[in-house]
Amino acid sequence: MKKITRRELIKQLGASALASGLMGASNQAFAKNSAHIVIVGGGVGGAAAAKYMRLLNADVRITLIEPNPEYIFCPGSNEVVIGLDTLESLTVNYHTIKSRYAVTVIQDRATEIDYANKTLKLAHGDIIRYDKLIVSPGPDFKYDAVEGYSKSLAERDFPAAWHAGPQTNTLRDQISALPQGGTVLITSPVDPYRCPPAPYERASFIANKLKLTNPSAKIIILDSKDDFVFHDVYLDFWKKQHGMGTENARVEWISKKNGGHVTQIDTKRRTLTTANGEVHKGHVINIIPPEMAGSFTRMNGLTEGDWAPFNSLDFSTKRDKDVYIIGDSAAADPMPKTGYIASNQAKVVTKAIQSELTGQQIGTPFITNNCVAMASENWGMTVAETFRYAGNNRPYEERYTLSDPTSNPYQQSIRAEVAKNWQRTFRKDIFS
Amino acid sequence: MMKHIIIKNGMMNKTLLMIGMVCALHSPISSAVTGGMSLEENDRLRNAYPVPTGAMLGDNCSACHGTKGAEFNEAMPPLAGMKKAHFIKLMKTYRENAFTSIVMHDVAVVFSDVEIEAMANFFVQQKAEQWTQPNWNPSLKESQP
């Protein structure tokens, strides 16, 4: 490991780092000249990496680079859309990560990796030397996949609301203001994207709200796919609760092969046009764009195609063995892009780093995604998904079991309780 | 994810047929959709590489059971400090689907005896106290601001 004196590091980090608690938290680590683990991105993957690295090693220096002072959890944000929860209750800060786990949190945007010198440049000009760099920036949207759509439209009248934040509240307000008998259009993107069941959970939640306040309203899901996870459970729910298949269906799902793939938006007419030329008019239009790896990943040559490939044993990138990729930006198929997966990838990476630092062989990785979704507060579903290591240059092998439709209300309800329980415990696991 | 052909219980091969029958016997209100690798393939991969450590396996449980299995406030029970024999018996009972549950049968079915024991060893070493105590690591506390 490179020896970095305290003075050098202060010089590299600049005064902003001192203000963010670097001096106190890392005194002991400085004395031991221990390795410096730097993490780009303070979402679920990055925060889990910081915490679980500290659980393994009291001496390493850990620095987390994140431009935002707070993080808003995505799980739970569909509840916000229908007023069952608020963004405030999904918001966490980095105080516990800093104080309990002695992590230096720098509020800035990472821009450039200098692989040869093992340094990271930040937007405000600071340069940080790393021994190990864990990259977890989350995905970016391909707004231009729908002609006429853009980031600025998403931030105004046509929210994507796919990362919990102001757009979530915009969508909530639009749903509340929907005229009687109005139409909500939701587009669902091609795989892979963050949280595969969430477009269908969102459509279900909105339908549940409108059933009470605006029963003649309609929700149309325009899908760029022919199938989706929990398809059977959602179809069953929509039939039983929202008249799917009847004249008065509140929810309609149009698959790709039935003309659901949206190619264009006309913001003046408030219409979406699909690949087969059909035009749908919506009072509320929620476009969930397709995704690609975050720009930090792409700008630093970590991606092949849309995502960043890695070595399966330890999630080190194909580009550089000391730079790791986790979370939604990783080319981790067949793993879905969930916070659950990101946090478990973080645990694999931190164990691999700890093995390397202590001169031990890296152990066999193992990852699960035992995740949840809901159709309503009383109608839940679960997936138990295991990923086994199948060789360093091969994808993980997946086995999964999904909830099936059930007419047993107790089973529907207890699955929903499991889902709510999971949300609470998961947030605590990552940020406290 | 989940691009493999979805195999309805008991329809595609003998192993799944047997699982289907077991489900039918023990879990009449539940049927499940299973896909991806078969249990034989799961066994083969399990045997092809060293057993993951107890921590590697056990840390996967934290999203539901809390960090180090030490979440004591929620519906899903804590695992931290659980007696080894109890953990092993429970996991094997789930694995055989002899104890109806929401997800634990589907979670447990992929693990070998050795893996279950490794997890049992991991959890019995964790303090049976709500995660986290402010002084979870005294050496760190001293260096904090």
Image (cartoon, coloured by chain):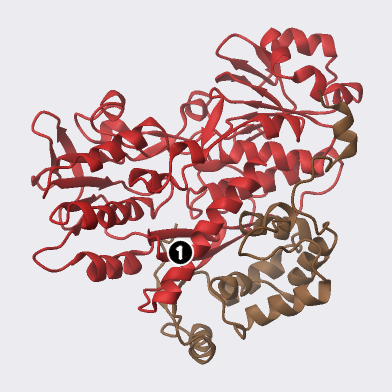
Chain colours: A red, B brown
Q: Residues within 10 Å of mark 1 (few under 14, many from 20)?
A: many
Q: Which residue carries the number 1 mark?
A: A416
Q: Who is closer to the viewer here, A172 or A238?
A: A172
Q: Quadrant of the C terminus of chain A?
A: top right
Q: Height in image: A107 above or below A416?
A: above
The percent coordinates of residue A181 (x first, y second) are 11, 50
Residue A304 visible to an observer of this rendering: no
In the image, residue A52 lies at what x, y percent? 72, 43
Tell me the element at label 1. helix
Q: Is residue A311 left or right of residue A174?
A: right
Residue A89 is left or right of residue A3, and the answer is: left
Q: Please state, as top left, top right, bottom left or bottom right, where the N terminus of chain A lies in the image.
A: top right
* Left or right: B114 in relation to B17: right
Q: Residue at x 81, y 28 (%)?
A: A35
Q: Amino acid at mark 1?
A: Ala
Instruction: Tell me what residue is drawn at x 57 percent, y 57 percent.
Output: A396
Residue drawn at point x = 57 percent, y = 53 percent = A394
Specify the subunit that label 1 lies on: A
